């Protein structure tokens, strides 16, 4: 949220959380004080014209891979991407190992 408040276009990928869960976390991060309401947080986001796009594993209907993230960056002209649970991404560049 800090990067978005500074005018950066931010993308967020999560391999485990839903869009709603991510939105709730962003609202918590945007609260001006610990006791602020979600409505106050939303007002801050609107005032600062924060740009945050979210993509989830559920939305993709599979684990994301590097190509998906690249498309996400290009499509939304993102300045930065945050990847939650990097271990939940597919590695489409690795070659299968011979274990015999």
Image: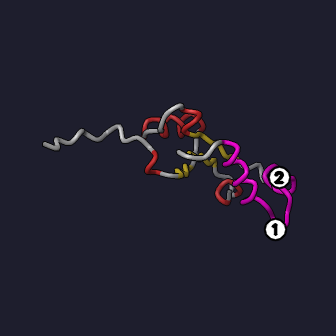
Name the residue rendered at 78%, 52% in the picture.
45
Identify the residue at the far top of this view: 61
Q: Quadrant of the N terminus?
A: bottom right
Q: Assess whether residue 59 is covered by the magenta stretch.
A: no
Does 25 appear in magenta? yes
- Label annotation for residue 33: 1
Extreme-left residue of the structure: 100
Q: Secondary structure of the magenta portion, mostly?
A: helix
Residue 22, percent across and down? 66, 48
Relative horizontal placement of residue 36, taking residue 2 as reference (left or right): right
The numbered mark, 1 or 2, whose residue comes first in the sequence reads 1
Can you identify the residue that label 2 sits on? 47
Report the number of numbered marks.
2
- Residue under the point 86% across and 58% down: 37
Work out whether residue 97 or residue 80 is closer to the camera in this orientation and state it.
97
Taking the image as shown, residue 89 lies to the left or right of residue 96, namely: right
Q: Which region shows up in magenta?
A: 19-46
User: x, y (%) of residue 26?
Assistant: 70, 53
Write down the quadrant of residue 78 in the picture: top right
């Amino acid at each position: 949220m800090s990067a978005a408040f500074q005018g950066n276009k931010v993308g967020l990928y999560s391999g485990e959380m839903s869009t709603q869960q991510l939105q709730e976390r962003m609202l918590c991060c945007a609260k001006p004080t610990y006791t602020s309401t979600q409505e106050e947080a939303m007002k801050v986001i609107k005032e600062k014209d924060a740009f945050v796009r979210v993509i989830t594993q559920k939305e993709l209907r599979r684990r994301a891979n590097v190509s998906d993230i690249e498309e996400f960056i290009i499509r939304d002209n993102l300045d930065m991407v945050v990847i939650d649970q990097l271990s939940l991404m597919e590695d489409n560049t690795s070659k299968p190992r011979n274990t015999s």
